[in-house]
Image (cartoon, rainbow, N blue to C red):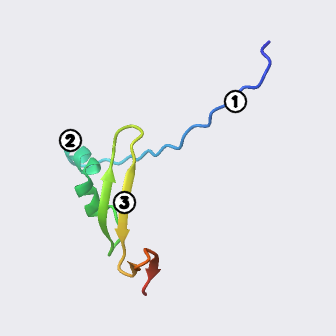
Amino acid sequence: MATGNTATKEKEPELVLTRVFDAPRELVFKVWTDPKHMAQWWRAHGFTSPVWELDVRPGGAIRIHMRGPWYRLSDDRRLSGDR
C-alpha cells in the first residue's frame, strides 16, 4: 500500500470550436490562421482591429487590439469613453 500525498494536476483550459464550412479545407485553415483575414471579421460592429498577432502553434498566443467608435486613448495612454 502506497502512502503519501499525490498531487493531481488540473487540466488546462481548452477551447474547441466546431463549424462546417462550404469551402475547401485549405482555404478555411488559411483564413483562420492568417492575421490579415482574421482582422476582417473578428471584431464587433463599428470596431477596427489595427493590431493582430497570431501564433497557431501548440502553446501559441493571440494578441488583438480593437478600437471602438466611442473610445479613444488619451495622452497618458488611458482608455476613455466619448459617448
Task: Looking at this view, name the residue that lies furthest to the front.
Answer: 76
| Circle 2: residue type | Glu
Q: Residue at x 44, y 44 (%)?
A: 16
Above or below for 49 versus 21: below
Task: Looking at this view, name the residue that lies furthest to the bottom.
Answer: 83
Quadrant in which the C terminus is drawn? bottom left
| Circle 3: residue type | Ile
Number of numbered markers? 3
Q: Residue at x 31, y 62 (%)?
A: 51
Tell me how far mark 3 sits from mark 1, CA to CA: 36 Å
Q: Is residue 16 left or right of residue 26?
A: right
Quadrant of the rendered image containing residue 39? bottom left
Q: Residue at x 23, y 57 (%)?
A: 36
Specify which label sits upstream in the sequence, 2 or 3. Answer: 2
Question: Looking at the picture, how far across and down is residue 29, in whole percent?
Answer: 25, 44
Give SS at disc 3. Answer: strand
| Circle 1: residue type | Ala
Tell me how far mark 2 sits from mark 3, CA to CA: 24 Å
Q: Which residue is mark 2?
A: 26
Q: Which residue is mark 3?
A: 64
Tag 1 near tag 2, CB within 8 Å: no
- In the picture, the disc for residue 7 is 1
